[in-house]
Image: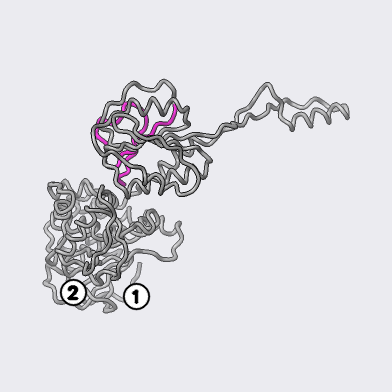
Amino acid sequence: MTPLRHSTRARRALTKLAVQDPAFAALALWCTHLDSDRREGAAWTDGRAIHYGADFEALSLPEQIGLAAHHILHIAFRHSPRSHAMYLRFGDRFDEDLFNLATDAIVNETLMLTGFILPRPAVRLTGLLLATTREKISGQDAVTKYDAERLYIALMQDNAATRTTRPGDKGVASGGGRTGGQGGTGGEKPRPGGALADAARAYADQMAFAPDLDSARDDRDDGAGREEDAEWRQRVARAMEAGRLAGHGIGALGHRLADLPEVHTPWEVLLRGLVSRAVLSSPRPLATRPARRWLARDADARAHGGPDPAFEPGILRDRDIPRIVVGIDSSGSVDGTLLAKFAAELGAIAKRTGAETHVLVFDTEVRSRVVMGGAAWEKRITDILFTRDGGTSFIQVMDEALALDPSAVVILTDLEGPFGPVPRRRLPIIWAVPGDPPPSGAPFGRVLSLAR
């Protein structure tokens, strides 16, 4: 990658950074560094180049080094294309600024753990978690647990109702106090998420951040994007290994970082594949009935005295409508945003396969039974009233599900409750868990985490 011109504003900081950290010495060479005054702020990233603004020169040298490292990690960890990928997954429900906040919190926490100095105030992963989920966790444990997608989804999963922008609210920002540029987009429009997302936005406002990451929503084809992702994974792996061998800098943490640019299959894709394979009918050979093609060939051979054709069995096609049973644990941590996405995926599967879908809402017992069909699948399932009280038991819901003779069973739950005996019949059973599944897992079926 050869830049058209190189930043003069960041030259000194980049030189010092290469001496200070061997991992960054390698990664910085693969980034384009440009001076730009087209927006306010000290620096920002578009996924391919780092742009250094006039405010960058006002920072101290240690702050310049830390800020340059901050944006190098944005590019190396592929945050811009990953933001675009999340937009493709969630559409209008995706909050780009909140994802930017998640990436900056992870990057800043990582850099501070390795001794870098950033412009203050600076969001940190530990601070964001404490302000939202109230999770008290060390910085090292936090960066080994959360990647950007997992953190973003955790912030968007909430039992509170979706809220709208209040007059005077600022746009979410994500970087150091002087790491960003433009603020919110303005206007009164719905903001996705509930109480946790609002708490994250309040934390961002408190820290006076502005977005510093432009999503890579360009015209590249998927093949080129995947190739570029693979190249960056190799570069990061080599750089982290160099740092690890040196024994200092970010390389000492590198192999434990959860946000390294790795390929993770979204849970929607896994769910789609598991359920679709279960409900799609597979034609079976029927030895007692000949194929129509064989009958025609046999008749032709008899009429013209030709040799008898080799027998071809007929094909038995399943005429029964496939059936999916969906159990929803009303006492678990199933928020409206996740339920809507979950419903949209199952609705699309049912529409594509023609499957009949039975929804069982349960806690210790089955409380509601609904047969889904037609349009407005997502709205109907989110309109179901939940008890939100009491414990959970999977015994009755599994008995009712098996009695419906389904092709697949999907249970949305936190897996906290008695399971009962292992079903005698072999069929796909999927336990869809909103967060990280418990270590014990489930005694039967497949556990699918919706945390990514």
Picture residue at 28% right of the left edge, 38% below the top: 387
Q: What is the x, y in percent for residue 34?
A: 28, 74
Q: Which quadrant: the N terminus?
A: bottom left
Q: In the image shown, does 240 or 192 lie closer to the viewer? A: 192
Picture residue at 25% right of the left edge, 34% below the top: 438
Q: Which residue is mark 2?
A: 56
Other residues around mark 2 within 10 Å, as few (<14) / some (14–19) / many (≥20): many
Horizontal side, residue 405 vs residue 13: left or right: right
Q: In the image shown, does 383 or 61 lie closer to the viewer? A: 383
Picture residue at 22% right of the left edge, 46% below the top: 145
Tell me which amino acid carries mark 1: Leu
**Magenta span includes 286:** no
User: Which region shows up in magenta?
Assistant: 427-452
Give above or below for 154 relative to 172: above
Upstream in sequence: badge 1 or badge 2? 1
Tell me which amino acid carries mark 2: Phe
Q: What is the x, y in percent for residue 115?
A: 11, 58
> Which label sits on residue 4?
1
Q: Check disc 2 and report its element: helix, strand or loop.
A: helix
Distance from disc 1 to disc 2, alpha carbons, whole Å, reads 20 Å
Farthest residue, direction right: 304
Q: Nearer the viewer's eye, disc 1 or disc 2?
A: 2
Q: Check disc 1 and report its element: helix, strand or loop.
A: loop
In which image quadrant can residue 59 be found?
bottom left
Q: In the image shown, does 235 or 389 lie closer to the viewer? A: 389
